[in-house]
Amino acid sequence: MTSPSAARFRLLAPLALCQIIGWGTTFDMPGALGRIIAADLGFSNEAAFAGLSVMMIVSGLAGPWAGRL
């Protein structure tokens, strides 16, 4: 039988790796494609980039709470 810490590591290591890859590939996308996306959706550039800022603020505030869960 495996220890709880080894089982936890086997669960969290792939999750952490996927999060790093996911954020790494999509975080800079609005910077490169934001103007095109805004024009396509009929938003102003400011509104399109404000969405990214709001997302980061909410993630930062919700992170400690989600981590405790």
Image (tube, rainbow, N blue to C red):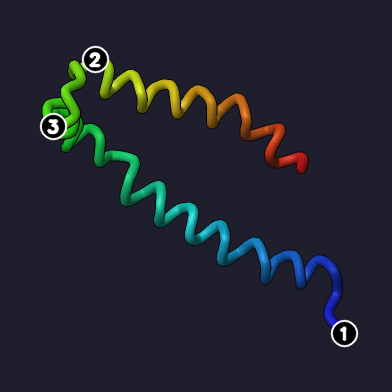
Identify residue for label 2. 46
Which residue is disc 3 drawn over? 40
Residue 39, quarter of the rendered image: top left
User: Which element type, helix, strand or loop, lies under badge 3?
Assistant: helix
Q: Residue at x 12, y 33 (%)?
A: 36
Q: CA distance from mark 1 to mark 3?
A: 55 Å
Q: Which mark is residue 1?
A: 1
Residue toward you, 54 or 20? 54
Q: Nearer the viewer, residue 9 or 49?
A: 49
Q: First in sequence: mark 2 or mark 1? A: 1
> Element type at marker 1?
loop
Image-based side of 30 in relation to 23, left or right? left
Mark 1 against mark 3, which lies toward the viewer?
3
Task: Name the image quarter holding the N terminus.
Answer: bottom right
Give the label, 2 or 1, closer to the camera.
Answer: 2
Q: Residue 10 location in percent, x, y?
A: 67, 71
Please report whichever mark, 1 or 3, sits nearer to the chain's N-terminal start. Answer: 1
Specify few, some or many for label 3: CA neighbours under 10 Å numbering under 14, 14-19, or 20 or more: few
Q: Amino acid at mark 1?
A: Met
The residue at the point 56 percent across, 28 percent down is: 60
